[in-house]
Structure formats: C-alpha cells, structure tokens
Image: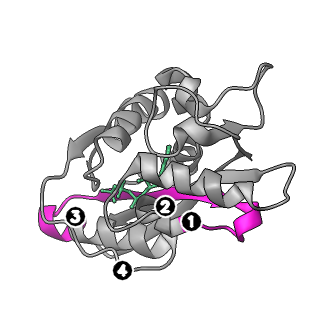
Amino acid sequence: SRIVLATHNPHKVEEFHGIVAAVRPDVEIVAYDGPEPVEDGVTFAENALIKARAAAAHTGLPALADDSGICVDALGGAPGAFSAYWAGHRKDAAANTALLLDQLSDIADPRRGAQFVSVIALVDGDTEHVVTGVWPGRLATAAAGAGGFGYDPVFVPDEQPAPARTVAEFTPAEKNAQSHRARAFVALADLLRSL
Ligand code: ITT
C-alpha cells in the first residue's frame, strides 16, 4: 500500500524510510509537498491529526504524520509539543538545546529524567488512528555527538550498554531500532494491514 508522509522535516523522512523498511517493507512511503497547515494544537495528538488530515485531504491517499518532542520531568513535561520553537519563533536546534540545558542547570534534579515522545496520526478517509511511542532517558549535562537532529545531542536513552551515549552518538540504524518514532510506528504497523 501507498501512504503519504505528511512532514516537511527531512530528518523525519529519512528515519521513516529506515523504520518502514525494517517493520513493513511492503508499505510504500510517498513524500508530501502540499501546503503546510497551521499547527495550532497544544498537544502532540492534535498537531499530528492536523498534519495528517491536511495531507489526506490534499492527496486523496492515506496519510501519516508525526508530531514529536522532548518532555523533561523537572519542567513538568515541557518543552513537549513546543519543542521545535522552544527558544523562539525560528526552528533553531542549537538554541533550543542550549536553552534546555540552561533551564536544567538551575534545577536540583540529579536524575535529569526526560523522554522523547512521538505521536503518529494515520488518516484514511473518515478513519483516524493515533498512536504514541515513548523513549525514556535523561538529559545530558552537555551536548555530544554529530548525528541525528533536534535534541539528539542532549538526550541519553536509559537502556544502552555503558558508556552511555547521546542519540547523536548512535548510528542511524541504532536510533531507528529503538526510537520513540520506531515505537510509535510499530504500534501502527498492524493497522496498516487493513489499508
Ligand atoms: P513537521 O511538523 O513538518 O513534521 P517539525 O520538525 O516541525 O516537522 P514537530 O512539529 O513534530 O516537527 O517538532 C518536533 C521537534 O521535536 C523537532 O523540531 C525537534 O526539535 C524535536 N524532536 C522530535 N523528534 C526528535 C528526534 O528524533 N530527535 C531529536 N529531536 C526531536
């Protein structure tokens, strides 16, 4: 089956290609280059549905969208759905991560608990599904690594052999085998069989 991937983030596109090839090689992912809707939801689920509905309406194909971010325990789950613009109106990953590290340096939380969250919406005509993937870990004390995107240089997943690395120090295959995005897609994979 063919599914439109409603994202304008090239890193997400690349990750979805890797994840789908491993989990559902029979599914063909089609890029979406139509209009970008206003993401004015305040939750991951609201924004994922806004993006998937717009792409499904524009293309007439089943559409999948990911809304994702980092949720920090000591900040009550922030930045969450506001991760892309945490340091201002421009999507600036370096500024976002620097601000987050700065905010955590003022708070006494020895564990620095955090999680990456991906919510994927699948819209096929009138049928809508929403699934969530969570990748537990903690916030590093300093950025490390050159891979990935966004908050990858400051996120250290829990379940990994010592010495602990940030996701930006993972290979793309390692990230795609464990990530929040992969966990959400696995939850969706069986539903795709009925398309
Ligand atoms: P689309 O809306 O076009 O899909 P986007 O990048 O704006 O692209 P979001 O609105 O879902 O997507 O924002 C997600 C932000 O959360 C992203 O910009 C990163 O800052 C962060 N993020 C999400 N997944 C991540 C990951 O796997 N690694 C690092 N940071 C991630």
Residue 80, disc: 1
* SS at badge 1: helix
User: Looking at this view, is 184 or 157 the one in front?
Assistant: 157
Nearer-the-camera pick, 98 or 16:
98
Q: Tell me the amino acid under the disc marked 4.
A: Asp
SS for tag 3? helix
The CA distance from mark 2 to mark 3 is 22 Å
Question: Does residue 119 appear in this view?
Answer: no
Residue that label 3 marks? 55
| Ligand 1 has an atom within 8 Å of the beta carbon of the residue at disc 2 | yes
Real-space Cα distance between discs 4 and 1? 14 Å
Residue at 29% in and 58% down: 63
Residue 33 locus on image (x, y percent): 13, 53
* Ligand 1 neighbours mark 3 (CB distance < 8 Å): no
Spatial separation of the CA atoms under disc 3 and disc 1 = 23 Å
Q: Is residue 59 magenta?
A: yes
Segment tinted magenta in the rendering? 55-80
The structure residue drawn at horizontal position 85% and vertical position 48%, both measured from the top left corner, is: 111
Q: Position of residue 104 (x, y in %)?
A: 71, 57
Q: Secondary structure at mark 2?
A: helix
Residue 74 at x, y percent in the picture: 76, 64
Checking the image for residue 40, the label placed there is 4
- Left or right: residue 146 versus residue 179 is left
Q: Which residue is mark 2?
A: 83
Residues tagged 4 and 1 counted as in contact (Cβ below 8 A): no
Callout 2, which amino acid?
Ser
Q: CA–CA distance between discs 1 and 2?
A: 6 Å
Q: Earlier in the sequence, mark 4 or mark 1?
A: 4
